[in-house]
Amino acid sequence: MDKTLILVKRYDDYLMRVFQIVKEHEKNVCYVTFNKTPEFILESAEKNQIPRERFYFIDGITARIKSSSSTMNSVQIHEFDNLKTIDKNIKAAVSKGYTLVIFDSISNVLIYHSLNDASMTKFLDGLFEFLSILKGDVVFVCNENDIGNYSLDKTISRFNAFIKPHAELFGI
Amino acid sequence: MNMKKNSSPQKEKPQMKKIMVVDDELDILEPIKETLERGGYAVVTASSADDCLKKVQTGEKPDLILMDIIMPGTPVREIIPKLGNIKVVYLSAVRISDGERQEIVKGKNILDFMLKPFELSVLLKKVNSIVG
């Protein structure tokens, strides 16, 4: 099972890197978003020749900025700081065949709730166990500074691949 | 007692326009505050949409509110209607489509959506164009 962590700097534009992974995997995508609306992601995906139909959204941002009905193939969540709700919705989407889970981002969830390394690790362990049975893969995004800020050592240890788009871009 | 009569009416000092900046990140808040103060504005800050509402309800009367979106507490969407006619500009790193942007600013007191990061000089120009 691929368990990738994308480590970004604040304001990095990493969406293209995410799309690169989506293209490589060829699986349908469960995109959990807290900082980009599904509409924005879909428009960007289409510009990058990734069909809309590949995406299902767990939308943790739209309800914060406007009242509207959900984009097709999405569910809005209103309890932004409830990992159980997020977990339940991810598992429902994966069961429908959206087996590449993109979680954008750990840093946003940390804002809403006083999470710690232990609660995040518990969430990840439960999710990864479920996904391994259904042959899913995951890509999580996190601000590099938050690893230290929130002491996320155990959280980090749950991933088996790391990408730093900033370093890739500048050849560091 | 020698009372000097004023030969001309005393000119009233124009009242400084007041801007409220709402953001939970101090390293964003402080440079914006300094830039606006150098630009001649009175500035009051708030750390969340709830804090913003509390300050408005207890007497603050900003001419413009610059508000982040991703903050702890009540979603900004629920707070905006309670701010009356105070003008608001969103400052946020949230990515939205052009259509969504137009929808958000249409017909309400939300005037614009500025994407972070931005140049502080650009922000000051925007504020000047709205309340200056």
Image: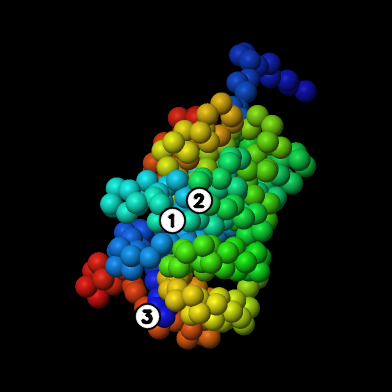
Residue at 43 percent of width and 74 percent of height: A137
Q: Is residue A106 above or below residue A59?
A: below
Residue B98, located in which quarter of the rendered image?
A: top left
Residue at 55 percent of width and 77 percent of height: A130
Q: Which residue is mark 2?
A: A73
Do circles 3 and 2 both sit on a common chain?
yes
Residue at 33 percent of width and 72 percent of height: A164
Can residue A145 be seen in this snapshot?
A: no
Among the two numbered marks 3 and 2 on one chain, the one whose residue lies closer to the N terminus: 2
Q: Amino acid at mark 1?
A: Phe
Q: Chain of mark 3?
A: A
Callout 3–callout 2 Cβ contact below 8 Å: no
Task: Please tell me which residue lies in front, B49 or A142.
Answer: A142
Residue A21, located in which quarter of the rendered image?
A: bottom left
Task: Name the quarter where the C terminus of chain A is drawn.
Answer: bottom left
In the image, is B38 to the left or to the right of A123?
left
Give the image location of residue A145, x and y in percent: 46, 73
Q: Chain of mark 1?
A: A
Q: Amino acid at mark 3?
A: Ala
Q: CA distance from mark 1 to mark 2?
A: 7 Å
Q: Which residue is mark 1?
A: A55
Give the image location of residue A153, x and y in percent: 51, 85
